[in-house]
């Protein structure tokens, strides 16, 4: 009887260890299906980089965005993006080993609009018009991805992201309330994730960091 009890306890211990190992190997914390590094989600990352800006924090609020988290996770985990970029470089549809990563991200982002141009150049307002968000008259979220080499440490990457947000704010956002009393509220969501070049093991010299950004305009027309 004593031997059976010891055997039962040993079996239970083995099963517990197996279950923990299965949880670790079967998925990561961000839901990605491929190999890649950890994601820093919008719920923690956006406030960090926005608080380090000079002007963007005065014009935009930080917003968590689970859709963007999943999109960034999938792009970083499943597609190879060059790790040679010394500055934040906007990822266009034709960059990477497979152009359908845009479709992968779009499945998570729903009605949000994929920005085919750098955020600091143009953004999409409702109706497909390319114009700064400060001219927008409808609610809209647009998003896109940047890439920078993993050889940079997190502090340097975060500083680059903060500088980018300042530039976006300067070019995309005007007065929050215009002469007619119409208001425009802006929120931003930012997530980042390591993107492994060969999807098997980390290599700082070849890997990159993918940064996803989503900017939302909430337009309210004045009532008289």
Image (spheres, helix red, strand yellow):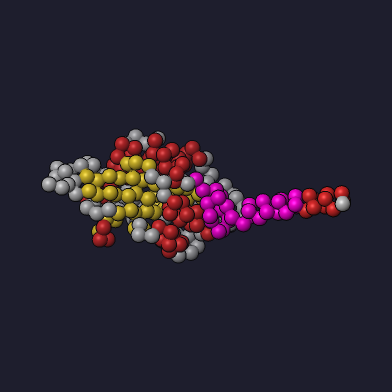
Give residue 129's position: percent from left, percent from top: 25, 59
* Residue 39 falls left or right of residue 120: right
Give residue 121's position: percent from left, percent from top: 30, 51
Residue at x 47% of width, y 54% of height: 70
Q: Is residue 177 above or below residue 5?
A: above
Residue at x 47% of width, y 46% of height: 41
Judge by depth and name the residue closer to the eye, 188 or 52: 188
Judge by depth and name the residue closer to the eye, 115 or 8: 8
Q: Is residue 76 magenta?
A: no
Give residue 154's position: percent from left, percent from top: 50, 40
Residue at x 63% of width, y 53% of height: 23
Residue 200 image-quadrant placement: bottom right
Residue at x 33% of width, y 53% of height: 141
Residue extent of the magenta highlight: 12-40
Q: Is residue 215 above or below residue 59?
A: below
Q: Is residue 3 above or below residue 170?
A: below
């Amino acid at each position: 009887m004593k031997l059976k009890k010891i055997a039962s306890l040993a079996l239970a211990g083995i099963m517990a260890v197996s279950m923990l190992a299965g949880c670790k190997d079967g998925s990561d914390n961000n839901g990605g299906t491929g190999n890649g590094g950890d994601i820093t989600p919008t719920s923690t990352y956006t406030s960090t980089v926005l608080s380090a800006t000079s002007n963007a924090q005065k014009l935009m609020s930080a917003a968590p965005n689970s859709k963007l988290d999943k999109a960034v996770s999938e792009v970083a985990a499943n597609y190879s993006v060059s790790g040679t970029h010394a500055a934040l470089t906007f990822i266009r549809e034709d960059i990477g080993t497979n152009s359908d990563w845009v479709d992968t991200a779009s499945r998570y982002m729903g009605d949000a609009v994929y920005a085919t141009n750098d955020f600091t150049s143009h953004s999409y307002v409702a109706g497909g018009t390319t114009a700064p968000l400060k001219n927008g008259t409808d609610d809209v979220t647009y998003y896109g991805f940047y890439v920078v080499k993993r050889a940079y440490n997190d502090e340097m990457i975060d500083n680059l992201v903060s500088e980018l947000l300042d530039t976006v704010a300067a070019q995309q956002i005007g007065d929050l309330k215009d002469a007619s009393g119409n208001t425009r509220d802006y929120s931003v969501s930012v997530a980042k994730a390591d993107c492994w070049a060969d999807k098997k093991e980390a290599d700082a010299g070849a890997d990159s960091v993918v940064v996803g950004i989503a900017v939302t305009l909430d337009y309210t027309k004045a009532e008289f």
